[in-house]
Image: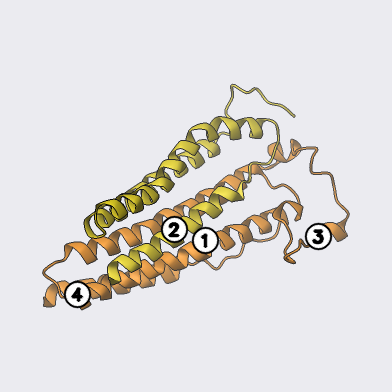
Amino acid sequence: MPTSRVLESSSPRTDPKPLACRGGEPDRAGRRRLEDVGEEPDPRFTLANERTFLAWTRTALALPATGLAVAQLLNSVPRAARMVISVPLIVMAGVIGVMSYPRWRALERALRLSQPLPYASPAAPLGVGIALVAVAAVVVLVTQ
Amino acid sequence: MTRDPGMLFDVGAQLERTTLAWTRTALALAAVGGLIARLAIRTAGASLGYAIAAVALAPGVTAALSAIGSYDRRHARLQDGEPVVSPRPLICVAVTLALASGVSLGMVLT
C-alpha cells in the first residue's frame, strides 16, 4: 500500500499522544470517542470504509424493495406463501440497518489503532439467507 | 501541507468514488422511499398517504442534495490534511434503513 506519501502529510492536529492515552478517555456513556482513539488514518482508508458501509446500505435497501414487490405483485400466490418470501428479506434488511454503523465504527477504530481489521463479515450469512429465500421462492412459484 | 487545489488528491480518485457511492445510495433510498410512498397513498387514503409519502421520500432527496456540495468540501479537507471522517451522515443512513425495514414489514404484514 502506498501510504507513505499521505502519512508524511498527516495533519499537525494529531499531535503524538503518550502511549497510555492511545485508547482515549471514555465519555459519559463509558465509550471512547472515535476522534480520541489512536491516530488519524490515511484518509483513503477512511473513504474506503465509508464506501463499504454505503455498499452494505444499498444491498440492504434492495431487500425491502424486493419484499414489498413480492407482497404486492404476486397476486396469484396465497398470502402465506408471499409472506414466506418477503418477511425474511425485510427482516434481513433490518438486521443490516442495526449492524452496519457499529461495524463501520469498529473498522474505523481498528484503522485508527493500526490494528488488523476484523475479518468476520456479515456477507456470508446474508448470502446464505438470500439463497434460502431464493429456494423458497422457486418452490412457491413452481407449486402454485 | 497544502497541495495544489486543482489536482486530484490521489490517483485512485477515492473521494470521487465515495461521492458516487453516496449518489447511488441516494437513488436506492429514493427508490425504496418511492415504493413506500406509492403503497401508502394507495392504502392509507389521500391525506395520510401523502404525509407518509413526503416522509418516505425525504431521505433520498436529502442524501442527493448533500452529495452535491460534499465533493468540493471534502476535497478541500483532503488537500489541507484535515480528517474526512464523518459519522453523522452514516448514522442517519443506518437509522433510515432500519426505519424503512420496519415500515416495509408493517406494510407487508397488514
Lower sequence index among marks 3 and 1 = 3
Helix, strand or loop under label 2: helix
Mark number, residue B97: 2
Subunit bearing disc 3: A
Q: Identify the residue under disc 1.
A: A100
* Placement of the C terminus of chain B among the 4 image quadrants: bottom left
Asked if the residue under mark 2 is in contact with the one under mark 1, i.e. CB atoms within 8 Å, the reply is yes
Task: Name which residue lies at 38% across and 57% down.
Answer: A61
Q: Identify the residue under disc 3.
A: A25
Q: Is residue A112 visible?
A: yes
- In three-dimensional space, the C-alpha distance between marks 4 and 1, rounded to whole angstroms, equals 31 Å
- Rate crowding at label 4 as few (under 14), some (14 to 19) or many (20 or more) other CA atoms within 10 Å: some
Lower sequence index among marks 3 and 4 = 3
- In three-dimensional space, the C-alpha distance between marks 3 and 1, rounded to whole angstroms, equals 24 Å
Q: Identify the residue under disc 4.
A: A79
- Label 3 is placed on what type of residue? Glu
Q: Are marks 3 and 2 on the same chain?
A: no
Subunit bearing disc 2: B
The image quadrant that residue A119 belongs to is: bottom right
Subunit bearing disc 4: A
Residue A96 is situated, as x and y percent measured from the top left of the image, at 46, 64
**What shade does chain B have?**
yellow
Left or right of A143, for residue B49: right
Q: Is residue B90 above or below residue B76?
A: below
Residue A98 is situated, as x and y percent measured from the top left of the image, at 51, 65
- Label 1 is placed on what type of residue? Ser
- In three-dimensional space, the C-alpha distance between marks 3 and 2, rounded to whole angstroms, equals 31 Å
Q: Is residue A79 above or below residue B63?
A: below
